[in-house]
Image (cartoon, grey):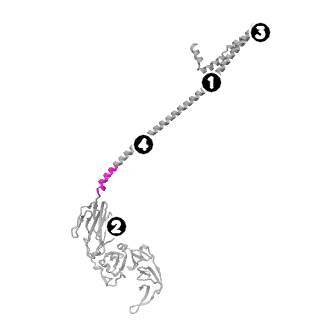
Amino acid sequence: AGTYSGLYLFRVAAEGGLEPVQKISGFNESSRFFEEDQSGRIWVGQFYKGLYELRFDVDHRTTKARRLPGAQEQGIDEQVILTRIDDQLYVATKSGLYRLDQSRDQLVEAEGFAAAIGDQQVYMLKQDRQKNVHVIAEHSVGFFKKISANNYVFRPSSLFRLRYHFNNDLLNISVQTPKGVLYNANEGFLYYRPELEERIPHQQSVLVGSVYSFEEDSLLYAQGPFEQARQLDGPLHVTHRARLLQFKVEAFQFHEVGDQQFRYLLKGFDEDFGAWTTSNTKEYTNLWEGDYEFIVQTRNNFGEIISSRPLTLRVHPPFYRTHLAKVLYLLAGLSVLLVILRVQHRRFSRRTEAVEVAKRRELAAKQQRMTEMEQQQQKTLQAMKTTQMQSELRHLNNLLAASTMNLVVKNEFMETIKEQLKAVRRKGESAETKKALEQIVREIDGTLRLQEDWKQFEHHFDQVHGDFLSRLRDEFL
């Protein structure tokens, strides 16, 4: 037997009753749930204590305990409900249902059950004598009906309407009844027989009753609860002036009317359904233009989620955001761009022309400077040539003057000697002397007739006076 301080060992007395033997040593944790697996090990679980594996000695008086580690998302450190289903051990936690894999001592997903329950917190899980597996979860109350081995189908239960009447302290279910099961309630017990459960189809469970625009003070859509369902030819058209839209829904579940819950989704605006709320109205503000689809969900008598038919609406943009306006904007933008391009082209042309003019001016200035430099160089060269020519002319004048003086002096000297020799010849008496003097005079005459000195004079004179003598000779001879 499990207690708050561990397990106690009992034996069956001869009269058929139970006699206490002793407390099993080695384990002192609270033991609300315990089950034996296929290999004879005892597994113990308690809501907030976790899951333990116990290995007993031969006489079952002492044990060694090992706490089973689990992943954080499995939640076995916060809630553990241990139960047996078809000789397999299952664990219900705050994050769903798991099966104990006895070959690896690990918690794995509970095939056949996890798909219907999902990640809801599970408060109770038990199999009855008819192999139905009863479950109470956060948003689901029902049972899994066994179809074949390891094949179960979930059936929602009408007990969903009584879920707040279960004992919320130590929820328990008794399966020791010939038919059905017993739930402990806040006041007494609830007797439930799954085979008597009837499914009543609901043709119209929830619908969108009206769509109202506060800005325009206009009812855009209305559907009475007992009217024939409206068939819209297309989406509900909403203008851009409808800044505040109110959707009002109608539900046809007449139990716990004050606790009826809804959740809403506007496709194109919401990413997913919102939180559950008891309000049957939903408001949206400042919807952007586009197509939307409004859906509302609620729960039926069995806790199943049912959805309304989608209501499609189309929000039209103001004129300045219409396609026509965008085309006009595009044309205006292209026009402005064209004007800007033209202005830029003109500005660029003017700048290019100004640059070219500046380059031409700069080139002309450079050419002018080069011309001036060339002229200056020519003037310098001409001046240098003039200076050199003047220097050479002065030198030639000096040579000409010297040559002239030499000729004059020489001729005068020769004339003087000639006259003196003639005088000596006249006064001389010796024939040989006279002959010798005549010979000298003839040589002097020959010397005076030589043209070398004259040619030299002519050369220097022509250099100084530009071939004056040559031109004079050519003209008159």
Q: Which residue is mark 1?
A: 394
Which residues make up the magenta segment? 317-334
Three-letter code for the amino acid on which mark 2 is drawn: Asp
Which corner quadrant holds the N terminus?
Answer: bottom left
437, 304: nearer the viewer: 437
CA separation in Å, label 2 and label 3: 163 Å
Quarter of the rendering containing residue 39:
bottom left
Q: Which residue type does callout 4 highlight?
A: Arg
SS at badge 4: helix
Per the rendering, the mark at residue 6 is none
Find numbered disc 1 in the image and state the secondary structure of the residue it sits on. helix
User: Which label belongs to residue 272?
Assistant: 2
Above or below residue 126? Residue 277 is above
Q: Nearer the viewer, mark 4 or mark 1?
A: 1
Name which quarter of the figure residue 399 lies in: top right
Quarter occupied by residue 36: bottom left
Cα distance in 3D space between marks 4 and 2: 60 Å
Packing grade of label 2 (10 A; few <14, some 14-19, many >=20) is few
> CB of mark 3 within 8 Å of CB of mark 1?
no
Q: CA distance from mark 3 to mark 1?
A: 49 Å
Residue 318 in magenta stretch: yes
Residue type indicated by callout 3: Thr
Front-most of residues 268 and 445 = 445
Image side of residue 47 versus residue 156, left or right: right
Q: Earlier in the sequence, mark 2 or mark 3?
A: 2
The residue mark sitting in front, 3 or 1, is: 1
| Mark-to-mark CA distance, 4 and 1 | 62 Å
Q: Which residue is mark 3?
A: 433
**Sequence-first tag of 3 and 1:** 1
